[in-house]
Structures are given as C-alpha cells and as structure tokens.
Amino acid sequence: MCKLFVVPTPIGNLEDITFRAIRILKEADIILVEDTRKTNILLKHYNIESKMLPYHKFNEHKITDSIINRLKSGETLALATDAGTPSISDPGFFLIRECVKNNIPVECLPGATAFVPALVDSGLPCEKFVFEGFLPHKKGRLTKLNQLREQTYTMIFYESPFRLLKTLEQFLEHFGPERKISVSREISKIHEETIRGSIQELLNYYKDKKIKGEIVIVLEGKQK
C-alpha cells in the first residue's frame, strides 16, 4: 500500500531519533531529503541504504507531480529534512497537501522539533503559545512586530545567528527592555546554550559575542 511517511530527524545529536523512524527510513523505497550530503551522515550512522531523492524549496513545485505518481504506483516514500520535523519552517506542506488532494495516506511520526525543548527550557509559560517561525526579513517585518505587541501568549521565533542582534534590537523597540526572553542555540549539540533574562540583558550579553548555530527565541507575552 502506498503511503507518505513524514519522518522527523535529529536537530543535533544523532541519538535523538526513534526506533520507528529508523525502521521507516530503512523500509522506504525512496527518502525525500533537503540535502543528500547532510542526510547521508544520518543514514550511514544507522546503516540505512534506501535511495535518496533531493526535495527542497527550489524544486518541490517541479517534481511533486512525479512523486505523487510514484506513490500512486504503490511505492512507499519517506519525507525527511536536514533537521527536525518536515513542514515546520521546512519543506513538506506542499507535498502533504497534494497527497491529501489525491487521497494518498500520509502519516507523520512524532519526533524532534527545535521549538519544543526551547520553549520548555525558557521557563516561560508553556500552556498557551504561538509559533511564529521566521519573521519576514524585510517587507512586512515591522508590521508583524506591531501586531505581536499586544499578544498575550508566549511567542516562539526561529532566527539566524547573523540576524539575532538586529532582532533583539527590534524587540527592544517594540516590546520594551524589561520583557522576559530566552534564546536557545545549538539545541542537543555539544555547545548547547540557553540564555534567559530581559530583552535588554540579552542584547547586552550578545552584543560583543560571535554568535553561531541555529537559534530559537522564546518571548514572554504581554502581561494582562
């Protein structure tokens, strides 16, 4: 029976993968991956020999029809990204939507997603939160920040290390210096770090530092 399995992969430590995910990757006829070089590290570690096919934001609209045809012919495919769960700020949504349109079964395995450990580690309220992913780089960025000014739920953002200082400066302007914030980087890797404090304190902390690694920002909501 044809099926698309959505398979989360480790965001750092290669041990952060489920037994089931390893089995699915081994059994799949093809694994759709963002970057074959990065995924090959994981596959070699677990002796997985399934064929890989590049599937990323630059080619997904071109090859999705052929992938749908493969599934309709009875193949089982696994969708994996470089790290974390596909569709969460990564490719996946477009293919999954087309599978649903074509009545092709889709099954997403539970697994690694960077914002969950960052949220829990932040010490900020977890019962209600909004995941914003990456803020717009230019057009609409300030409009979005103005909209979020009144948000009362904990907010979660992904950010590049090259834009962290700019983002903190804009947060300072829009949310004030005392709003609580947490910055996690290199989650599950050797140099994992979570820094907590006010926006002003974190801006001061990072101002003179060389910032590396993928970053998750968790921001306190507006107090009622």
Image: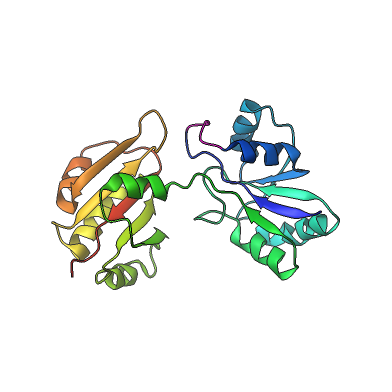
Which residue is found at the position 53% from the left and 31% from the top? 14
Q: Is residue 197 left or right of residue 217?
A: left
Image position of 139 with respect to 125: above or below: below
Quadrant where the N terminus is found in the figure? bottom right
Write down the region rendered in magenta. Answer: 13-17
Location of residue 103 in the rendering, given as x and y in whole percent from the top left corner:
75, 67
- Farthest right residue in view: 73
Residue 162 in view here: no
Which is the main secondary structure of the residues drawn in magenta? loop
Figure quadrant of residue 176: bottom left
Location of residue 22 in the rendering, given as x and y in whole percent from the top left corner:
64, 36
Image position of 143 with respect to 30: above or below: below
Which residue is found at the position 15% from the left and 47% from the top? 201
Q: 40 and 131: which one is in front? A: 131
Quadrant where the C terminus is found in the figure? bottom left
Location of residue 105 in the rendering, given as x and y in whole percent from the top left corner:
72, 60
Q: 147 and 107: which one is in front? A: 107
- Farthest left residue in view: 178
Which residue is found at the position 50% from the left and 44% from the top? 112
Picture colour scheme: rainbow
Location of residue 173 in the rendering, given as x and y in whole percent from the top left corner:
19, 62
Figure quadrant of residue 102: bottom right
Which residue is found at the position 22% from the left and 55% from the top? 169
Q: 182 and 121: which one is in front? A: 121
Number of marks in picture: 0
Residue 95 in view here: yes
